[in-house]
Every structure is written in C-alpha cells, then in structure tokens.
Image: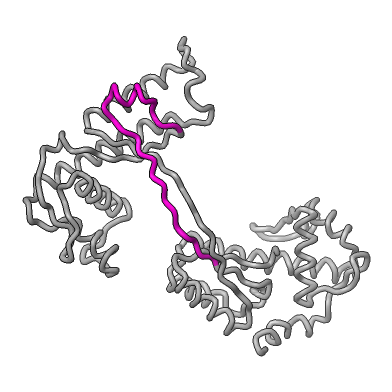
C-alpha cells in the first residue's frame, strides 16, 4: 500500500537487523527476496583491433542522415556518444594494463585495494575513488583472464608478463546488439554475453512506518547497516512525503467536517489542496484517484480516518496521537 516503505539492502543479514530494529519500534516488517538476472555485452580483443572496430562504428554513425543508406541500422533511441565513451574506456584500460605490466615483475602483488575490499572485507590502506577502484578491478580481471595473474591467499600475484599490445582487453559494450559474425571475424574481436544472477533482499515495512518517532535515528541506523546513500535519500524523502500527504488529507477533512471519497479524489487530482500558502517553498498535490483510494484505506487501518466512503471524517486527534504508541507497546 502507499504508506509502506521498501528498503533495498545488500544482504539477508542486514535485512534481519533492520527488521529487528523496526519491530522494537512497533513497526511490522518482513524480508522480501527476489531473483535479479541481468545481461551485459562485453567486447574482447586486442587494443588495436577494438579501436579499429569502435572507430569504424563511430564514423559510420556520424554519416546517418548525410546521404547514407544506413539510417535504419541503429536503434532510434541509441545515443551516438556511446562510441566516444567506449573508446575512452578502451584507452583507459590499455593505459592501466600497460602501466601495470611495465611497473611490476612476476611474483609482485598487484591490486591490493581490490583484494582488501573484496576478499579481506577490510578498509584499504590507501583511499581511492570509485572510478579508481573500478579501474583497478578491471585491470586485475584483464590480467587474470590473460593468465598473467593468479589469486593467492596473499593477494593478486603477477605470474607472467606480456607485451601490452598482445593482451586481450575486455570493455563494456553499450550498444544493444552484438556485432555480426562477419564483422567480428573482420576485426578479430569477440562479443561476450555476461549473465549475472543474484538474489536481492528488500525490507518491506507496514504502513505503521508513518508513526516512526525518530526518522533521523532510523536513517543513521540504515546507513550503518549498508543501505546506500541514494536509497537513504529516497527513504528520507518518502517518510517526509507520506507524513505531509496524510497531514494534508486530515486537514482537508477537519476543514470540511466530513467528505466523500469521491470529493477527495477530485480535490487531490486537480491539485486544489493547499493552494494558499506563504514562503518561497509551497506544497501542491497531484494524487491519482487510485492513489487516494489506497491512501484512505491505509489511514483507516491506522485509525486516522473513519466513516464510510460517502462520509469520511477525521478520527479523534488524541486517539490518533497515541496510535503509534499503542502499536509500539504491543
């Protein structure tokens, strides 16, 4: 329902901690598990071959609409800047691989940041940006795939060296279709379809989340339990928005004395509610009829509104104020 919250987490253990926290606050919650399967295309080949292929694609795409017969070859919503980005990724990967092979000898440990983070689950000694981490990870994977590096208990160990131009590189290919067989053979490249499957965990709360007394403490708890910053922002915004919307609906009922569900649908879908306001930030509401129906249903369950659909009215304010406490003390 509309007053519930869904919190994405990285692991089942983190999900259980969040459920435990919410139940202590009197808010029911459960863990939802769903499979997630994604498919990514990856180009593989030597640097010069990949560069030739991508450059040809870029040049061919630039000819679209300039007397070319290839106007139907690319999807209409395809962004041609992908070729430029892919070429930049290719150059960056070649530079990183070349640097690693030139600076190290067989027996040297490389990729310490990645090893500490992924295998040891510890904070790396040297902090790095997400871009630097992704680059180091890609380089390690490339060297392992070329049988130039092995995973040991001590870390990633360089076992052999090769000329950088002979190394097979692997770069993301954001074009939606793989190259045709004839094209792949001409440029000596391979397109890999990478199937990635994992189980995703989500904590689903009850609509009682509306009565959470200390949202800031809850957000801090989520942060400490691995919820990413973007999700934290959405959860905070969701909690505040639900409070504001329920307050507005109750305010409209108090002003009118009572109202029908149909009146509320029209009121909110036309964005009439709370049009009079002061200050540089003012609220407007545009809720679909279906959303209003679900909102009223949730608020009924919470004891915030009462009456039939034809005569809805707000509950006693004191009863509403103690509803959350009653839930918590159960």
Q: How is the image coloured?
A: one colour
Q: Is residue 232 visible?
A: no
- Residue found 48% across the figure and 74% down from its top: 220
Q: Where's the N terminus, which quadrant?
A: bottom right
Q: Nearer the viewer, residue 224 or 257?
A: 224
The correct choice, above or below, for 195 with respect to 243 in the image is: above
- Residue found 73% across the figure and 83% down from its top: 323
Q: Is residue 15 visible?
A: yes
The correct choice, above or below, for 19 with respect to 295 in the image is: below
Q: Nearer the viewer, residue 128 or 194?
A: 194
With 78 as the anchor, is 328 left or right in this view?
right
Residue 201 percent location from the top left of the image: 51, 65
- Magenta residues? 177-202
Q: Kindly indicate the quadrant of the structure image that contains residue 6.
A: bottom right
Residue 145 percent location from the top left of the image: 23, 46
Say if the magenta span includes residue 182: yes
Q: Nearer the viewer, residue 85 or 214?
A: 85
Say if the magenta span includes residue 253: no
- Residue found 65% across the figure and 64% down from its top: 241
Q: Kindly indicate the quadrant of the structure image that contains residue 126.
A: bottom left
Residue 318 percent location from the top left of the image: 78, 85
Residue at far top of view: 67
The correct choice, above or below, for 18 with respect to 260 in the image is: below
Residue 166 percent location from the top left of the image: 15, 35
Q: How many marks?
A: 0
With 239 as the anchor, is 168 left or right in this view?
left
Residue at far right of view: 310
Q: Where's the C terminus, which quadrant?
A: bottom right
- Residue found 37% across the figure and 30% down from its top: 83
């Amino acid at each position: 329902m509309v007053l519930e919250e869904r919190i994405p987490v990285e692991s089942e253990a983190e999900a259980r901690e969040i459920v435990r926290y919410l139940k202590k606050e009197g808010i029911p919650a459960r863990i939802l598990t769903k499979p997630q399967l994604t498919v990514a295309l990856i180009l593989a080949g030597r640097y010069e071959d990949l560069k030739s292929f991508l450059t040809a694609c870029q040049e061919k795409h630039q000819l679209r609409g300039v007397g070319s017969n290839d106007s139907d070859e690319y999807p209409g919503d395809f962004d041609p800047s992908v070729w430029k980005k892919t070429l930049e990724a290719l150059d960056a990967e070649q530079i990183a691989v070349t640097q690693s092979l030139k600076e190290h000898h067989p027996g040297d440990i490389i990729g310490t940041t990645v090893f500490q983070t992924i295998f040891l689950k510890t904070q790396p000694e040297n902090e790095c940006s997400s871009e630097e981490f992704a680059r180091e990870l890609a380089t390690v994977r490339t060297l392992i795939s070329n049988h130039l590096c092995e995973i040991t208990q001590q870390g990633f160990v360089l076992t052999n060296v090769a000329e950088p131009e002979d190394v097979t590189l692997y770069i993301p290919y954001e074009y939606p279709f793989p190259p045709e067989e004839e094209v792949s053979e001409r440029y000596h490249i391979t397109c890999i379809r990478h199937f990635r499957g994992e189980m995703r965990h989500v904590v689903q709360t009850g609509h009682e989340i509306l009565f959470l007394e200390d949202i800031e403490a809850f957000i801090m708890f989520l942060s400490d339990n691995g919820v990413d910053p973007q999700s934290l922002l959405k959860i905070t915004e969701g909690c505040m928005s639900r409070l504001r919307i329920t307050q507005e609906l109750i305010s409209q009922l108090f002003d009118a004395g009572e109202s029908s569900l149909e009146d509320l649908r029209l009121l909110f879908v036309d964005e009439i509610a709370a049009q009079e306001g002061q200050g540089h930030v003012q609220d407007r509401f545009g809720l679909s009829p279906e959303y209003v129906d679900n909102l009223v249903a949730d608020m009924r369950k919470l004891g915030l509104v009462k009456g039939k659909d034809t005569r809805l009215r707000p509950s006693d304010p004191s009863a509403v104020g103690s509803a959350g406490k009653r839930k918590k003390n159960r």
